[in-house]
Amino acid sequence: MSDKAAELVDPRIRRTRLSLQQALGKLLDEREFEKISVQDIAEAAAVNRATFYDHYPDKFALLECMVGTQFQELLDQRGVVFDGTCASALRAIVLGVCDYVASRPTRCERQRQMEPHMEAAVIAVVRKMLLEGLQRHPPQGASPEMVATAVSWAIYGAAKEWLSTPARVASEEIVGTVMGLVVPMLAEPTPQVLHG
């Protein structure tokens, strides 16, 4: 059995990682990310620093894992599965990104240091989900990886723009606009020449 396979089935590894993620989450409720040390996280999780480093190279990697896990759980709770052809699943992904980024504003405003890591985690989850569907139904003209990457960034970028809009509309209302931008990327990823 490979190390990766062992990690997937070993409940001790899952429990330790969950404990570290929960510890970081609790500490974030108390203070800013930049003021939280690996030692603080290890103590809150009741593990030693060596155990922390067995699982994560630094607190930023833990943050990305925590955010990715939380966002994936949100999509799982909503039953979102993208098979590469289902517009309603894509709509649910867009809505999930909008809802997730909107649920995090106080932390992001207080802790700008966290934002790139949160962004990377959400984009990675969206990309993985899109890629799984696109590999089943490969697009013409571009690799599934390229399309999944471009669409995941477009969805996240649109959600962030929506979030920063004064007097923004409800997330359900912006989904149609975002879909209008990303569906063509999925449907026809061949280069289009702009005439100006």
Image (cartoon, rainbow, N blue to C red):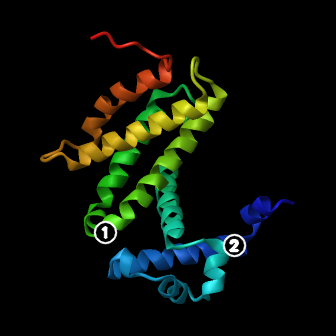
Which residue occupies 27% across, 61% down? 105
Decide if residue 6 is on the left or right side of residue 139: right
Work out which quarter of the rendered image holds the N terminus and state it.
bottom right
Q: Are marks 2 and 1 in contact (CB under 8 Å)?
A: no
**Residue occupied by mark 1:** 111
Vertically, is 168 above or below 13? above
Q: Which mark is residue 13?
A: 2
Q: Nearer the viewer, residue 31 or 136?
A: 31
Vertically, is 194 above or below 35? above
Q: Which mark is residue 190?
A: none
| Amino acid beneath label 2 | Ile
The x, y position of residue 60, in whole percent, is 49, 68
Vertically, is 172 above or below 31? above
Which residue occupies the extreme left position in the image?
167
Q: Secondary structure at mark 2?
A: helix
The 10 Å Cα crowd at callout 2, few under 14, some 14 to 19, many 20 or more, is some
Comparing labels 2 and 1, the label whose residue is closer to the camera: 1
